[in-house]
């Protein structure tokens, strides 16, 4: 995947401030110490999206000469992420934390405790509160770096509506309630369907709790119940893969259209087999790489870092999936 070097963004900030970039290029050091900063990375769960984000984190750390401590929850949830966070804070040697909060409200307290313990927080993929770290209810994170998920939901809705001819019924299979990313996707999807495609009925969402097998079972139940279902929107890795598998198992590939959020190899394979119509590729490498760069810049004294950065999408369909300029956004998981 292409690396997005952050120096241009720093350069723009420095130009506005009338300062030189040169003091910020060298590896940053913890305030009051002679040692380089140490960064913690705590994503939401083990999946291809976060694995690619980890690649970005590690690439930036290598380029900048920084140390990263990574802890990855095996399952999604506040009850799993919080004790891992607490253990990372208890180490006493972390200066920054790059994390994807598993609940926009319930993770506020644990992450605020980390800040109170002297660790600065950068959120990636998911945010706290309403995501407005300037005027919103939660302002302590340095920044949110991730997708505009409401817009991603809109793009997905238009793609699915086009695939089914603008009428019929569609089903949303999602992951967890009160998670900013998928909540935004659901919002944008429903918004477009209601305003632009009144002849399409939206069913769901059902929440699979980041369990692909549960997503498959839920989708299979809807396919059996709704004989005229036209399409499925899978809001993340597990949702899309489970939904696509259910469609294949029901012998409805090519008849029930699937739009997949997240460009896993499995989603692309389903596209090549005629099951998935459109894949929305996020840019997790960019999120991870920029998260490390933001930590470095903050430690070096940069005061004009954006509080919200949208990393964009690549929209993949059967017509462009072989194009190297697009295919490079398919998630490449190490090993």
Image (cartoon, rainbow, N blue to C red):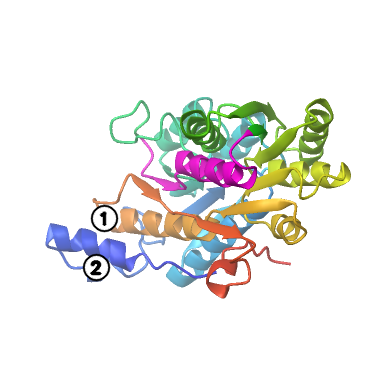
SS of the residue at dot 2?
Answer: helix
Residue on which the image places disc 1: 301
What is the quadrant of residue 274 in the picture? bottom right
Q: Position of residue 250 (x, y in %)?
A: 87, 41
Magenta stretch holds residue 146: yes
Gap between marks 1 and 2 measured at Cα: 9 Å
Placement of 130 over or under 289, stated as above or below:
above
Position of 42 relative to 133 (above/below): below
- 10 Å crowding of disc 2: few (<14), some (14-19), many (20+): few
Q: Which mark is residue 23?
A: 2
Q: Foreground: 100 or 248? A: 248
Give residue 74's position: percent from left, percent from top.
Answer: 72, 43
Q: Is residue 171 magenta?
A: no
Q: Residue at x 75, y 60 (%)?
A: 269
The quadrant of the picture occupied by the C terminus is bottom right
Q: Which residue range is magenta in the image?
A: 140-167
- Quadrant of image for the N terminus: bottom right
Q: Of 9 and 38, which appears nearest the observer?
A: 9
Work out whether residue 32 can be spotted. Answer: no
Relative placement, left or right, of 306 versus 170 is left
Whether 64 is drawn above or below 290: the answer is: below
53 relative position to 23: left or right: right
Q: Residues within 10 Å of mark 1 (few under 14, many from 20)?
A: few
Q: Do the residues under discs 1 and 2 have CB atoms within 8 angstroms?
A: yes
């Amino acid at each position: 995947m292409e690396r997005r070097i952050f120096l241009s963004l720093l350069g723009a900030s420095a130009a506005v401030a009338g300062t030189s970039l040169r003091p910020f290029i060298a590896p940053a050091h913890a305030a009051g110490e002679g040692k380089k900063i140490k960064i913690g990375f705590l994503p939401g769960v083990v999946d291809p999206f976060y694995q690619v984000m980890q690649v970005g984190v590690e690439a930036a750390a290598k380029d900048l000469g920084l140390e990263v401590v990574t802890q990855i929850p095996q399952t999604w949830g506040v009850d799993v992420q919080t004790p891992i966070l607490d253990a990372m804070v208890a180490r006493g040697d972390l200066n920054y934390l790059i994390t994807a909060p598993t609940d926009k409200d319930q993770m506020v307290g644990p992450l605020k405790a980390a800040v109170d313990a002297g660790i600065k927080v950068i959120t990636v993929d998911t945010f706290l509160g309403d995501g407005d770290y300037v005027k919103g209810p939660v302002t302590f994170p340095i920044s949110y770096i991730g997708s505009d998920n409401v817009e991603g939901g809109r793009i997905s809705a238009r793609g699915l509506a086009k695939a089914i001819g603008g009428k019929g019924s569609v089903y949303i299979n999602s992951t967890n309630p009160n998670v900013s990313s998928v909540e935004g996707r659901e919002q944008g999807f429903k918004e477009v369907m209601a305003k632009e495609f009144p002849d399409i009925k939206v069913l769901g969402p059902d929440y699979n709790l980041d369990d692909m097998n549960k997503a498959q079972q839920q989708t299979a139940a809807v396919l059996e119940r709704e004989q005229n279902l036209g399409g499925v929107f899978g809001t993340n890795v597990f949702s899309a893969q489970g939904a696509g598998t259910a469609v294949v198992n029901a012998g409805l590939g090519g008849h029930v259209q699937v739009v997949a959020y997240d460009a896993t190899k499995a989603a692309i394979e389903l596209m090549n087999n005629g099951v998935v119509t459109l894949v929305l590729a996020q840019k997790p490498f960019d999120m991870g790489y920029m998260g490390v760069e933001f930590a470095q810049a903050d430690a070096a004294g940069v005061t004009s870092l954006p509080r919200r950065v949208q990393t964009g999408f690549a929209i993949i369909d059967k017509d462009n999936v072989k194009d190297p300029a697009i295919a490079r956004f398919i998630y490449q998981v190490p090993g």
